Image (tube, helix red, strand yellow):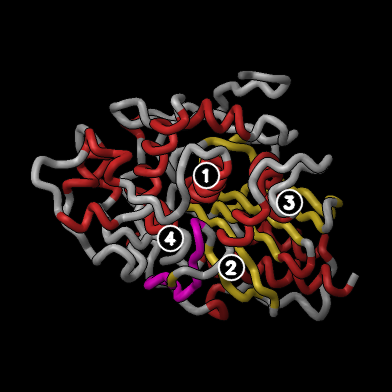
Amino acid sequence: MLTRRTFALCLPISLAALSVRAQGAADAASPSAEAGALPPSGSAPSLPEILERGERLPPLKAVIVSQDGAQLAERGYHGYAPTDSTNIKSASKSIVSAMVGIAIDKGLLDGVDQPIAPLLISDLPENPDPRLARITIGQLLSMQSGLGPSYARMIASRNWVRFTLADDFVEDPGGDMVYSTASTHLLSAILAKVGGKPTLQLAQDWFDPLDGFRIGSWSRDRQGIHIGGNQMAMTTRSLHVFGELYRRGGRTEDGVQVVPEAWVKTSWEQRTTSRYSGDGYGYCWFLKEIGGEDVRFAWGYGGQMLYIVPRLALTVTMTSESDSPSAANGYRDRLHALLADIIGAVRTT
C-alpha cells in the first residue's frame, strides 16, 4: 500500500521510445582503465577537487559519496541535480535481485535452485527445448540460463516472456555468462506471479520501510509485466539509498531488515565472469578490484553506477546520460577511475 513516500511518476517512458540496445554487446569491448582514466591533477587531491574533475565528463549527471552512513559529498553536473529523475537502465537489475531475495525469504519462492519452467508453464512453447526444464532462479540471476535473445528482438516481439522461452539457447544452462535483460525480465514475470501483484507494487510494499527509496515510472511489456532490469526511473539519491541498504547488510538506518543479510552476501559471491569486461558477476552485481579495494557494483547503460566498497563502508553513486554506451567509448573506465580517486581520498582522511 502507499505510505508517506508517494510513488509518483517522475520520468514517463513509453515502450515506443525504448532503446533497442542492451548493455551487453553494445557496451562490450572497451579500452584499458589507463586509457579511460581522468588526466592526473597532482598528488593526493581532496574529495572536492576530485569531484570538480567530474566536470570533464560531459555525460555525468550527479555523484553522491557516503561513508559509514555519513554523507561526504553530493554534487550535480551540467545542469542536473541529485534529486532529478533519470533512467537507471540495467542498474535496476540489482533491485530485481533484491526482490528475489525478499520473495525467497517470504516463502513465495523455494530458493535459487528452483526450476523456472513450472512457474512459467503457461508461457512455455508447445515443444519446449528440454533444457528449459533445467533453468533455475539462480541461473537467471547470474546470467547463466543459456538464454540470450537481444534486447531489440525481445522488445519487438508481441510477448516478451514467450519469445524468450521459445528462442534458441546460446549456452547450456549453468554455462558461460550470457548477459541479457531477457533473464531479469523472466524474473519480473515470476515475481508478479508468485507475489500476486505487479512487480512495481511489490517493490512499493517490500521497500516501504526504506526512507528515501522511490521508484518513479517503470515501463511494462505488452502483457503489463514491468521490465525486469531496464527502463526504471529513479533519482540519484534514491539509488544511493538502495546502495546504503546493501552496504548495511540489507537493513534500514533504524535497523529494519528489508533484504535478508544472507542474500546480500550470496549476491556478492562470484558465480561467473563477464566475457566483455572480465569482471566477476554474482546475482546481478558486478565484482571488481578498483583503487586497490574489492568493489561490488551495479552498472546501467550509459554510466549508471552504484558502487559499494565494503572494507571502507563506502557507497558511491553516479548517474549519467542514458542514451550512449559507457564501455565501448571508455566512459565506464573513466567512472571507475573517478571512483579510484574517491577511494584514495577517503583513505587519506
SS for callout 1 = helix
For badge 2, the amino acid type reads: Arg
Asked if the stretch drawn in magenta spans residue 197, the answer is: no
Residue underneath mark 2: 334
At mark 2, the secondary structure is helix
Q: Are marks 3 and 1 in contact (CB under 8 Å)?
A: no
Residue 245, compared with residue 335, is above or below; it is: above
Q: Amino acid at mark 3?
A: Ile
Q: Is residue 257 left or right of residue 149?
A: right
Identity of the residue furthest to the right in this view: 349
Tell me which segment is drawn in magenta: 273-284
Name the amino acid type tagged 1: Ile
Name the residue that disc number 3 marks. Answer: 64
Name the residue beneath numbered marker 4: 142
Residue at left 24%, top 53%?
Answer: 133
Residue drawn 24% across and 46% down?
164
Crowding at mark 3 (Cα within 10 Å: few <14, some 14-19, many 20+): many
Q: Quadrant of residue 138?
A: bottom left
Callout 2: few (<14), some (14-19), or many (20+) C-alpha neighbours within 10 Å? many
